[in-house]
Image (cartoon, rainbow, N blue to C red):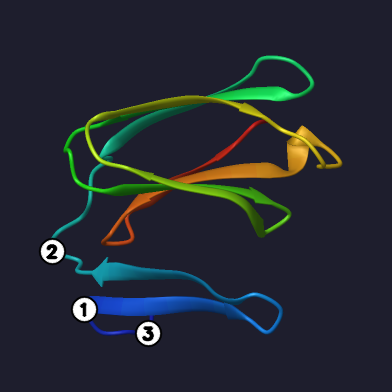
Amino acid sequence: MSALEEGYYGFEVYSKEYGTIENFKVNLDEKKKETSKYFTKVKVMDDLKVALLVKSFDASKKYVLILDKGHVIYKDTFEGTKYGKLFKIKKVRSLDDLVFEVRDDYGYGKYLSVL
């Protein structure tokens, strides 16, 4: 992506097995460096439970995904400045492989590991 000119770009994540998995936009503008728009925290409660907390500085629509070795196993959206959920994780080999993603419609986001 470093070879692309400044501007907004739309991306689609596609696989033969699942079709279109995700669509998102990215703003490549050196003049407008993004600052963190979220406070996020992941906490392992026990062998099956993981808590996610998100505090946003705006109330726009956000996307929450949980990925296990790159595969989306959970997808949710929320609007507002707060999101919190306790997930009971089943059918994964290890919690260590999970990644939580929180992002907005413009592609800005954070990735969190449970490690």
Q: Position of residue 108 (x, y in %)?
A: 32, 55
Q: Does residue 1 appear in this view?
A: no
Q: Which residue is mark 1?
A: 6
- Name the residue at the left extreme: 31
Q: Quadrant of residue 27?
A: bottom left
Q: Residue 31: give its label.
A: 2
The residue depicted at 75 percent of the width and 43 percent of the height is: 97
Mark 3 / mark 2, whichever is N-terminal: 3
The residue depicted at 14 percent of the width and 59 percent of the height is: 32
Name the quadrant of the C terminus: top right
Secondary structure of residue under mark 1: loop
What count of labels does the image hold? 3
Q: Is residue 89 above or below residue 13?
A: above
Q: Residues within 10 Å of mark 2 (few under 14, many from 20)?
A: few
Q: Does residue 62 appear in this view?
A: yes
User: In the visual, does 34 lie left or right of 96?
Assistant: left
Identify the amino acid type marked 2: Lys
Q: Residue 3: give its label.
A: 3
Alpha carbon distance from label 3 to label 1 = 10 Å
The residue depicted at 29 percent of the width and 79 percent of the height is: 9
Q: Residues within 10 Å of mark 1 (few under 14, many from 20)?
A: few
Identify the amino acid type marked 1: Glu
Q: Position of residue 4 (x, y in %)?
A: 33, 84
Q: Is residue 96 above or below residue 65?
A: above
Secondary structure of residue under mark 2: loop
- Labels 3 and 1 touching (C-beta < 8 A): no
